């Protein structure tokens, strides 16, 4: 029996290697939105999109670290 099945939790399925990359895709998408907003001289929207992009990037790095740590168990 697998360890994940014994624990009855979500396990590595939630923090699988492919699911972590969605955060990085989201960060890239928000970065594009920020670039377009700044290009069209919408400073407020551009700064907000940059902050959201940074949050997505930080979340991606956090969940990637958790996924790697989970694979070592």
Image (spheres, rainbow, N blue to C red):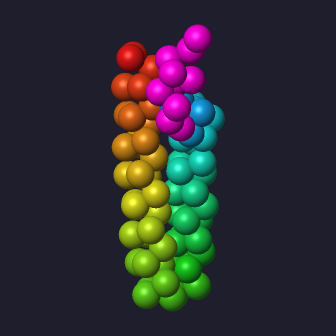
Q: Is residue 66 visible?
A: yes
Q: Is residue 28 visible?
A: no
Q: Residue at x 46, y 57 (%)?
A: 56
Residue 68 versus residue 62 in the image, above or below: above
Residue 29 versus residue 43 in the image, above or below: above
Question: Count the marks: how many?
Answer: 0
Q: Is residue 39 left or right of residue 62?
A: right
Residue 18: quarter of image: top right
Residue 72: quarter of image: top left
- Residue 12 place in picture, x, y as percent: 53, 30
- Residue 19 place in picture, x, y as percent: 60, 40
Residue 38 versus residue 26 in the image, above or below: below
For residue 8: magenta?
yes
Q: Is 39 in front, or is 51?
A: 51
Q: Residue at x 53, y 37 (%)?
A: 10
Q: Is 62 in front, or is 29?
A: 62
For residue 55: magenta?
no
Stretch in magenta: 1-10
Q: Quadrant of the N terminus?
A: top right
Q: Is 44 in front, or is 71?
A: 71
Q: Residue at x 58, y 85 (%)?
A: 40
- Residue 66 place in picture, x, y as percent: 39, 35
Residue 37 versus residue 27 in the image, above or below: below
- Residue 61 place in picture, x, y as percent: 40, 42
Q: Residue at x 38, y 17 (%)?
A: 73
Q: Is 37 in front, or is 39?
A: 37
């Amino acid at each position: 029996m697998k360890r994940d099945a014994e624990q009855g939790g979500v396990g590595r399925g939630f923090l699988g290697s492919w699911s972590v990359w969605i955060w990085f895709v989201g960060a890239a998408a928000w970065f594009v939105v920020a670039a377009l907003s700044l290009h069209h001289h919408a400073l407020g929207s551009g700064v907000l999109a940059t902050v959201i992009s940074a949050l997505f990037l930080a979340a991606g790095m956090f969940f990637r670290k958790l996924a790697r740590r989970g694979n070592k168990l």
